[in-house]
Image: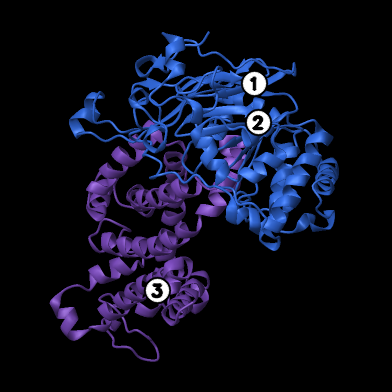
Chain colours: A blue, B purple
Amino acid sequence: MWEAISSQNASSGSPKVPPSGDGRDLLLEIRDLRVHFDLGGGTLWDRITGGSPARRVVKAVDGVTLVVRSGETLGLVGESGCGKSTLGRAILRLIEPTGGQIIFRGRDLARLSREEMRRERRHLQMIFQDPYASLNPRLTVRDIIAEPLETFGLTRGLETEERVRDLMRKVGLSPRFIKRYPHEFSGGQRQRIGIARALALNPKLIVADEPISALDVSIQAQIMNLLKRLQREFDLTYLFISHDLRAVRYVSDRIAVMYLGKIVELAEARAIYEEPLMPYTKALISAVPVPDPTIELTRRRIVLEGDVPSPLDPPSGCRFRTRCPYAIAQCAEVVPPLVEIKPRHFAACIRISPDEPQIERVAAGEAPGLKRAS
Amino acid sequence: MNRLAKVGLIIIFALVIAALFAPWIATHDVGATDLSARYLPPSSAHYFGTDATGRDIFSRVIYGARISLRVGVTVVIISATVGTIVGAIAGYYGGWVDRFIAGYLFNVFLAFPGLLLAIAMVAFLGAGLNKLILALSIIGWVGYARVMRAQVLKVRELEFVQAARALGASDLYILWRHILPNAIQPLIVQASLGMAGAILSEASLSFLGLGVPPPAPSWGVMLEEARDLATLQTAPHALIFPGAAVALSVLAFNFVGDGLRERLDPRRHVDR
C-alpha cells in the first residue's frame, strides 16, 4: 500500500515509480529529481561559515518522479513559475539538478561527466519557447541546422548541405532559404528551423519547452501538427511542456500537472480532462475557455483564491492548501504522496482515496488518504 | 554617427597617413641638429619652427605619430586579447573561477592608479619602447576583461547559447561561435578609448623620462625638452605643436569611442 510521507523525510527514501501500464518501454525515468537554487542571503558571517537558517533557497523542482515511455507524448502543465521549464532543462542538464536520478537509456544522466553528457545529447534534444532568442542572429539557416551535425562530425561538406536541405523539407521549409538569416523569417518559420535543428541528430527524446507559446494562434496548430507528424515519422518521444491546456490535450498521451515544484496529478490525457481528481487540476481545466458562446456563458468556473505562493517559502504540507477550497488542518502537516487513486490515475491529495475519488463527496474534515497510511 | 565622431575619424585618418608616410611628409631629418638655428619661430622653411638644438619640430611631430600609434595599437591589441580571454573565461565558467578572476584579480589591478603602476613597472623593467608597451598592457587588460565578462554573462544566458549547449557543442566552440560575435561590440568602444589612454600614457611616461629614451621624436620627449619657463616665454611653439598633437589624437579617439558607444547603446537612441 502507500503511505503518507511526512514533511521531514519527504525527499529521502526510495520513491515508488508509478508502474507502467501498457507495456511500452521506459525511455526516461526520473526519480526524486530536485533542482534547488541557492539565492545566498543571510548575513556575511552566515555566508562565510556556510550554514544559516536565513539562507534563501528556491526549490523549483522538489522531488519529481516520472516515467516517459518510448513513443509517447507526456504533457507537463502548470502555471508560470511552477518549475515545469526547470524540470525540462534539468533533464538535459542545462540546469544542474541538485539531487535525484535521470535514467535515460539505462544511464543516470545526473551522474555523467560533462563530456559523457555531451555525447549523450545526441539522443536528447530540445525545442525552445522563443523562436527569436533561440537562433543565433549571426548564423545562416544552413549553419544553424548543420551545427549539431558538425558538432558530432556526422556529415561533411556537401553531405551536410544535403542533410540540411532534407531536414528543411521535413519541417516544411523551402530549401531555397538555406542561405537566409533568422531575422528574414516569421515566428512560425523560425520555430520550424529550431525543430529541424533538434531533429538533425535523430534523437530519441525531445523536450519541447513551450514550443508554441510565443506563436500566433493560427500558427500554433500548424506547429503542433508538424510535431505530431514528425513523431510518427521519426518515432520520437516528447516531453511537451506548456501552460496551454488545450495544446497539451491535443498532443499528449498522458499529462502530468505540476504545482510549485511537485507533480500533483498524473493520468492519461482523457482522464485528466474528463475526470480530474485534484482541486487544482479542476480549477485549471475550468479556466480553459470553450469556443462556443452559449456554453461559455453558462459553464461553471472554479476561480482560485489568491496567488501562487512564493517558491522561496512554500506552504508546509500540501503546497496547494493555501488556495484549496477543500483544505483541512491535516493538509498543513502532511506532504501528500502521489498515489494511484484510479487505475493509472495518480493524484497527490490526502482527502481522496481509491474508495472515494470525488473530493466533493468526501465528508467534511475527513482525510481518507491519511487513514489508510496509519 | 555624430559630428564629433566624424571630426575624430578625420583626425585619426590624418594621424595614420602621417605615421605611414612620415619619410615623405617630413621636411627635415628628425635627428639633424643645427645650433645656428635654435628656437626659430614657424616659417616656410620650418613649418612648426625649431627646438633647442635646431631640429625641425614639424618633422619630429610627424615622426612622433609613428611612436604614438605604434604604442597605442600594440597596447590595445595585447590588452584587448588578454582581457577578452580572461573576461570570457570568468564570465562563461562563473563559480570559483569567476570569483577568483573578477573578485580578486580585477580588484588588485584596479586598486592601483594605472599610471603609477606603469611608472613602477618601467622603473623595474627599465625604459624603452617595448617595455613601455608591456607596462601599459599590464595595466590595460583589466578594462577589457571587465567589459568582456559583463557581456559574456549577459550573452551566455541567451537561449541560442543554451540551444548550442543542448546540441552538444563544446565550451570552446560555444564561446567562439556564439558568444564572442554577440559580445564583441562594446569591446570596440573600449578599444577606441584605450587607444586614447595609451597615447596619453606614452606621452606622460616619456615626458617623465620613463618612456621612450630622448633622441627619439616622441611627443612626450619633445614636451619634456621644452618644459622650462624660458622656452614657454621665448619659443612657445616648441611646446604648442607637440602638445597639440597629443591633445588632438587623444580627443579624436575619445570622440570616436563616444560616437561608437552612442551608436551601439540602444537606450541612447531612445533618448534622442
Task: Please state the horizontal and vertical placement of residue B229, each as a whole percent of the image.
Answer: 13, 77
Query: Is A294 drawn above or below residue B161 in the view shown?
Result: below
Q: Amino acid at mark 1?
A: Arg
**Nearer the observer, disc 3 or disc 1?**
1
Badge 2 amino acid: Ala
| Label 3, label 2: how far apart the Cα atoms are | 68 Å
Residue A119 is left or right of residue A164, and the answer is left
Of tags 3 and 2, the one toward the viewer is: 2
Q: Position of residue B166 (x, y in %)?
A: 61, 36
The answer to whether residue B99 is seen in the rendering is: yes
Tell me the kind of residue under disc 3. Answer: Phe
Circle 3 residue: B255
Q: Residues at badges 2 and 1 in contact (C-beta under 8 Å)?
A: yes
Chain assignment, label 2: A
The C terminus of chain A lies in quadrant: top left
A37 vs B24, nearest the viewer: A37
Residues at discs 3 and 1 both on one chain: no
Q: Nearer the viewer, residue B140 or B48?
A: B140
Identify the residue shown where x is 42% and y is 78%: B272
Q: From the viewer's perspective, is B259 left or right of A202?
A: left
Alpha carbon of mark 3 to alpha carbon of mark 1: how far?
Answer: 70 Å
- Crowding around mark 3 (Cα neighbors within 10 Å: few <14, some 14 to 19, many 20+) is many
Tell me residue B201's x, y (percent).
30, 61
Kindly report the distance in space between the C-alpha atoms of the residues bearing marks 2 and 1: 9 Å
What kind of element bears circle 1?
loop
Q: Could you classify mark 1 by the number of other residues whose Cα lies within 10 Å: few (under 14), some (14-19), or many (20 or more)?
A: some
Q: Who's the residue at 22% across and 48% down the image?
A: B112
| One can see residue B169 in this view | no
User: Which residue in the protein does label 2 denote?
Assistant: A271
Check disc 1 and report the residue beneath it: A344
